[in-house]
Amino acid sequence: MTAAADKTLDAEPGLVDRSPSWLRPYLRLMRADRPIGVWLLFLPCSWGVIAARPDGMDAGRFWWLLLLFAVGSFVMRSAGCAYNDLVDRDLDRSVERTRNRPIASGAVSPKAATALIVGLSLVGLAVLLQLGLPAILIGIGSLALVAGYPFMKRITWWPQLWLGLTFNWGVLVGAAAVSGGVPLPAALLYAAGIFWTLGYDTIYALQDIEDDALAGIKSSARRLGGDVRKGVALFYTATILLAAGALVAGGRGEWIWLLAPAALHFAWQVASIDRDDPARNLRLFKSNIWPGVFIAVAMLPL
């Protein structure tokens, strides 16, 4: 895949292309032209806030927390991408789709990338400090997961599982921010999010399956091989069952039907997977905003 093709398939035109030329490599390092990752980090946070919110919670506080999580999702996802690219700069040079990333291509130096990571992380810390001590402590607990993620593709066939543990940590932080703890429905939603990530990131990994094999990079897509559609179907089924369990655990089992839109969307994704069509698989991956929103809406009765 050429760099131009990569930009057409993966990046969203807009702010980055209209920004000053000196700023563009840093915005691309932050994946500012690929906002899907911010949504996939933010939506689990919203699940936790919605599922654990106390009766009669002030609407102003509710929306303020969602705004904080939106800002935190943007800066921490940006920091995570920069950190991942810093660690993976040599591997990125060996994969066609990633060899033009800012650090791998030399557009951003490792020293400048490190400074950017520190700055973004400080903003994330400022956001975290607004959430109360239980949420702060749980948030700090994610650091080991974040630090370890770039190395997982070298040592396990299931780096997508590690990503699921990391990317859905916001469920726990969101729940703690509104309730001071993690009630059972939120814990079940965290587990649902892990399987959701296993599904969508397996689809995403199909783009690189040949280059990954040449570079020795492991992934769930490579491990599943010809059974990738069955695997994704299993992951998404577990997502729906665990989300349904959250409703039951919260005493709202009669609202399980609200999960039907998410279930139907997952079924469409599974039916649409094509191992030989990277553009289609990328569109399927990006479409995961919708089941994330559908699950958030389904948790409103809790």
Image (tube, helix red, strand yellow):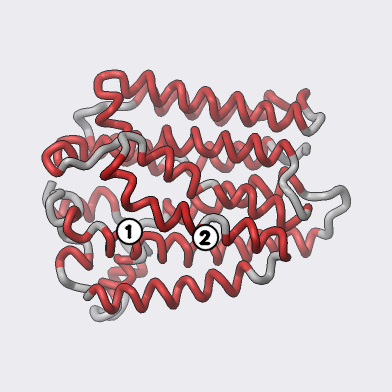
Count of numbered circles on the image:
2
Q: Is residue 248 left or right of residue 144?
A: right
Q: Residue at x 39, y 71 (%)?
A: 117
**Residue 67's x, y, as percent?**
63, 64
How far apart, in angstroms, are the residues tagged by discs 2 and 1? Answer: 16 Å
**Residue 87's x, y, as percent?**
28, 60
For the residue labelled by badge 1, is the local secondary structure a helix, a strand or a loop? Answer: helix
For the residue labelled by badge 2, is the local secondary structure a helix, a strand or a loop? Answer: helix
Quarter of the rendering occupied by the C terminus: top right
Q: Is residue 137 above or below residue 168?
A: below
Q: Residue at x 47, y 56 (%)?
A: 144
| Tag 2 near tag 1, CB within 8 Å | no
Identify residue for label 2: 73
Front-most of residues 293 and 174: 174
Q: Label for residue 84?
A: 1
Tag nearer the camera, 2 or 1? 1
Front-most of residues 153 and 109: 153
Q: Label for residue 68?
A: none
Q: Residue at x 58, y 29 (%)?
A: 261
Q: Residues within 10 Å of mark 1 (few under 14, many from 20)?
A: some
Q: Which numbered disc, 2 or 1, marks the residue that appears first in the sequence?
A: 2
Q: Amino acid at mark 2?
A: Ser
